[in-house]
Amino acid sequence: MHNRYIKYFVFLLFTADLVLSAIFLKNDHRDIEKIFSLPALSKVAGQPGYIALTFDDGPDRKCTPLLLDGLKERGVHATFFLMGSNIEGKEDIVKRMSEEGHLIGNHSYEHIQLTKAGPEAVCEAVEHTQEQIEAITGKRPEYIRPPYGDWNEELEEEIGMSPVLWSVDSLDWKLKDKGKIVRRVLKDVKDGDIILMHDIFPSSVEAALELVDILQKEGYVFVTADELLIE
């Protein structure tokens, strides 16, 4: 009886071997490699996810380079919505943003409330900034952050750009304290959030880099705003 079970087990192994051999012979070895080299999932269920850091009103001669240094050190790309009146004399900073892989968007020329300005003023405020950025980077921005988040369908048709608002407001312009800014953002942040900050205050730069350090340790991945919008 015992020998009969052994013979039966050997028969099963032999049959399985024949089946596997047939599969391997039928398929190219490259197909077999694909089975064992499937890419890892970009996001595992339960992990925190993706966040976009966005900065308005720059560039600033002192603060923006410090921010760029910190982001580069951490391997993070951010999104900068530039104000045309602040670009003049800081073209080197704008060029660096582009060369280092950050997304550059339009924030009007002088931070006007677009919905309350006439069509001519809106066109001038946006187009002037578009031309400045394109002249420096060779790329014409596709995205706009309307000052005060004030936007409507008429503007979208008139300007022909995609608006990018935000889901977490750091209130860095008001708080001007690294610890308070960090705590406010951490209280609300979640997967898919777009964080609003400004790269014109030293406390904002310090808070932004601390947020990157904390959230990267938690598993978050920082992307540019367009990557979130595409998702």
Image (cartoon, rainbow, N blue to C red):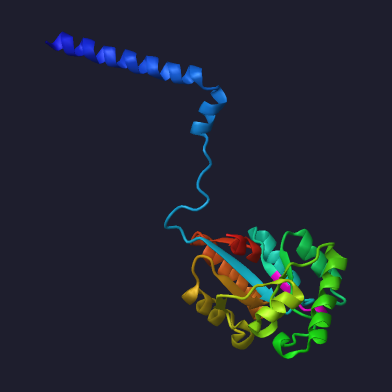
Instruction: Classify 110 as above or below 167.
Output: below
Residue 184 seen from this side: yes
Image x and y of residue 153, in percent: 66, 79
Residue at 54%, 79% (x, y): give it.
179
Q: Is residue 149 left or right of residue 49?
A: right
Q: Quadrant of the C terminus?
A: bottom right
Dividing the picture into quadrants, the one containing residue 52 is: bottom right
Q: In this view, does 92 lie to the left or right of 208?
A: right
The residue segment tinted magenta is: 80-84
Instruction: Classify 112 as above or below 211.
Output: below
Residue at 78%, 89% (x, y): give it.
118
Instruction: Classify 7 as above or below 189.
Output: above
Q: Does the magenta stretch include residue 83?
A: yes
Residue at 79%, 78% (x, y): give it.
126
Residue at 51%, 27% (x, y): give it.
32
Main SS, magenta region, reads: strand
Instruction: Classify 42 as above or below 220.
Output: above
Image x and y of residue 133, in percent: 82, 70
Image x and y of residue 28, in percent: 55, 22
Q: Does the magenta stretch include residue 82?
A: yes
Image x and y of residue 35, in percent: 49, 32
User: Looking at this rendering, what residue extends furthest in the left direction?
Assistant: 1
Q: Nearer the viewer, residue 123 or 11?
A: 123
Q: Nearer the viewer, residue 182 or 161?
A: 161
Q: In which quarter of the image is the N terminus?
A: top left
